[in-house]
């Protein structure tokens, strides 16, 4: 019994989001889930700022013109575009999760993959349409 050497016990550590996204090969449904959480957090953090800007734009015509001048800046447009992408992705993924909650047929590996692709494609197309309108294409 003395000759059996004790092997060291395995060490388990917490991993970060960087390791999850780079070291592990998550399916698209897993990536959509992570993006849904990140976009929700981003919208939650920026909600007071967005409500303040909305309130200021409704106060008077002068503050609305100041708000329009602020959005003429390219950096402000890019920030608005990122927030619009976060909203659109969060909205589309939220509909996906509501569908999964209400229908047992939507909860399978194949349906999860299909609906994740739909969420990414639809939110990307809507974001491109918003960007075209924001940057003056139409």
Image (tube, helix red, strand yellow):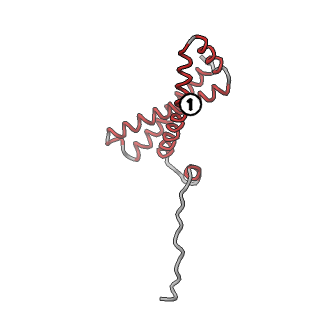
x then y, percent, for residue 44: 51, 35
Camera-side residue of 54 and 36: 54
Camera-side residue of 93 and 44: 44
Q: Quadrant of the C terminus?
A: top right
Among the 4 quarters of the image, the one containing residue 53:
top right
x then y, percent, for residue 82: 58, 31
- Disc 1, SS: helix
x then y, percent, for residue 21: 56, 49
Number of numbered discs visible in the structure rendering: 1
Q: Which residue is mark 1?
A: 83
Q: Which residue lies at the image location 55% right of the left edge and 32% below the top edge?
A: 46
| Mark 1 closeness class: few <14, some 14–19, many ≥20 residues within 10 Å | some
Q: Which residue lies at the image location 52% right of the left edge and 88% below the top edge?
A: 3
Q: Which residue lies at the image location 54% right of the left edge and 15% below the top edge?
A: 59
x then y, percent, for residue 71: 63, 21
Above or below, 64 relative to 48: above
Q: Residue farthest to the top? A: 61
Tell me if 70 is positioned left or right of 114 in this view: right
């Amino acid at each position: 019994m003395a000759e059996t050497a004790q092997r060291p016990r395995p060490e388990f550590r917490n991993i970060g989001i960087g390791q999850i996204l780079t070291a592990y090969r998550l399916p698209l449904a897993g990536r959509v889930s992570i993006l849904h959480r990140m976009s929700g957090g981003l919208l939650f953090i920026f909600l007071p700022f967005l409500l303040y800007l909305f309130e200021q734009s409704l106060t008077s015509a002068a503050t609305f013109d100041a708000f329009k001048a602020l959005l003429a800046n390219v950096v402000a447009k890019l920030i608005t575009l990122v927030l619009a992408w976060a909203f659109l992705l969060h909205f589309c993924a939220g509909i996906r999760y509501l569908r999964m909650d209400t229908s047992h047929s939507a909860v399978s590996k194949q349906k999860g993959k299909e609906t994740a692709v739909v969420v990414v494609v639809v939110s990307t197309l809507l974001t491109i349409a918003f960007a075209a309108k924001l940057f003056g294409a139409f």
